[in-house]
Image (tube, rainbow, N blue to C red):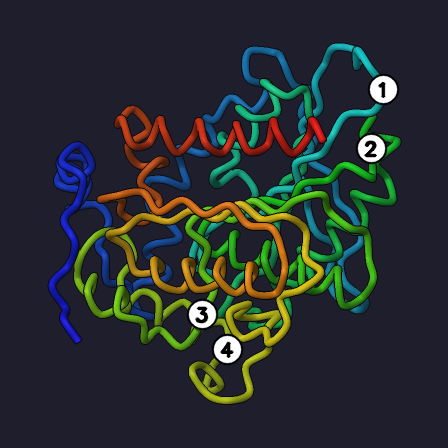
Amino acid sequence: MTTVPPPFDPELAAALELIKDVISPSLTPEDIEDARRGPGIELLADLDLAVDGFFEVEDREVPGPEGAPAISLLICRPAAPAPSGPRPVIYHVHGGGMILGNNRVGVDGPLAWAKELDAVVVSVEYRLAPEHPHPAPVEDVYAGLLWTAENAKELGADPERIVIAGASAGGGLTAALALLLRDRQGPRPIGQLLMCPMLDDRNDTPSSHQMAGLGIWDRTSNETGWTALLGELRGGPDVSPYAAPARAEDLSGLPPAFLDVGSAETFRDEVVGYASRVWQAGGIAELHVWPGGFHGFDGFAPQATLSRAARAAHLDWLRRLLAE
């Protein structure tokens, strides 16, 4: 198996060069605490969640899974009266490798979509590994979705028009949420938006080997994240598909999916494989592999040409989905 990596897009390579001293591609368990205190988390406190007054912003404590603590939902509703009935909901699950982040991480993307589409954003806080291994994170995400569906009318939202969305670990948890909702016969989202999702604990695809030591999140970081979530089970035969959706044997009956990934990132092959298996199961999936993209490139280098194309594709897919 060749381990020669595909090249980074030139604009993105320049962006990586600027951030390489701040973000290492290879995160070890010993690095988790320092990463949680990293500069990016502090910047989130300054994020304009209201987007110049377009949204009313609320943090709401809602019931968590049975026997577990309450969870926090960040709720952003357009301040103006709805022009035509209840609004759609974008239910957002943040990234962070299962070990980092909060419900502000990555929410700028969903807020931008919601401003264009006149939608409500609900971003869920979930317990992090390793302190809270599987199934705590996905059960928190599930509990938040149930609350959102049951209380949609209070939010001026339509419980029949919920789109679930997430990037990286949040994309993996979003895919797992879709499986859980199908199998528990819960509320049915109208779509799932999986951006560079973290799907496979086995960490042994060609792309995971090609990108070792490169980019933002390599196979060392991936092993750290998955081991935090799964402990000794990681990579073995007994991993639940609700932890690692690539383990699911049946991908039929799921909401239409949008998946994207960079050609120059660890998750490339597992994302392409997952989309292919959705099609093989008779499902609907739109797949984009961005040439030369590193993990999360559109967040780290939003002005790059490739990033603008990726963000336009997210919005275009949502626009078509909500028009149906």
Q: Is 101 on the left-hand or right-hand side of 139?
A: left
How packed is label 2: few (under 14 Cα within 10 Å), some, or many (20 or more)?
Answer: many
Please tell me which of labels 2 and 3 falls first in the chain.
2
Marks 1 and 3, Cα distance to the nearest angstrom?
A: 40 Å
The residue that mark 3 highlights is 200
Residue 65, image x and y in percent?
77, 63
What residue is rendered at 52% in x and 28% in y? Answer: 315
First along the sequence among labels 4 and 1: 1
Mark 4, residue position:
230
The residue type indicated by label 3 comes to Asp
N-term mark: 1 or 3: 1
Q: Picture quarter containing residue 149?
A: top right
In the picture of the structure, the residue carrying the numbered disc 1 is: 85
Q: What separation in Å lies between label 4 and label 2 (alpha carbons)?
A: 35 Å
Which corner quadrant of the image does residue 32 belong to? bottom left
Along the line of sight, the residue nearer the viewer: 119 or 286: 286
Front of the two marks 4 and 2:
2
Q: Are marks 2 and 3 in contact (CB under 8 Å)?
A: no
Q: Please rate how many residues cluster around mark 3, counting C-alpha atoms within 10 Å: few if below 14, some from 14 to 19, many from 20.
A: many
The amino acid pointed to by label 1 is: Gly
Query: In the rendering, at what x and y percent does residue 300 appear?
Result: 31, 36
Which residue occupies 45% across, 32% down?
Answer: 313
Circle nearer the N terminus (4, 3): 3
Identity, as a three-letter code, of the amino acid under mark 2 = Asp
Q: Amino acid at mark 4?
A: Leu
Position in image of residue 80 (x %, y %): 74, 10
Asked whether, in this view, residue 32 is left or right of residue 17, the answer is right
In-front residue for pair 302/141: 302
| Circles 4, 3 touching at the beta carbon (< 8 Å) | no
Residue closer to the observer: 171 or 72: 171
Q: Which residue is mark 2?
A: 158
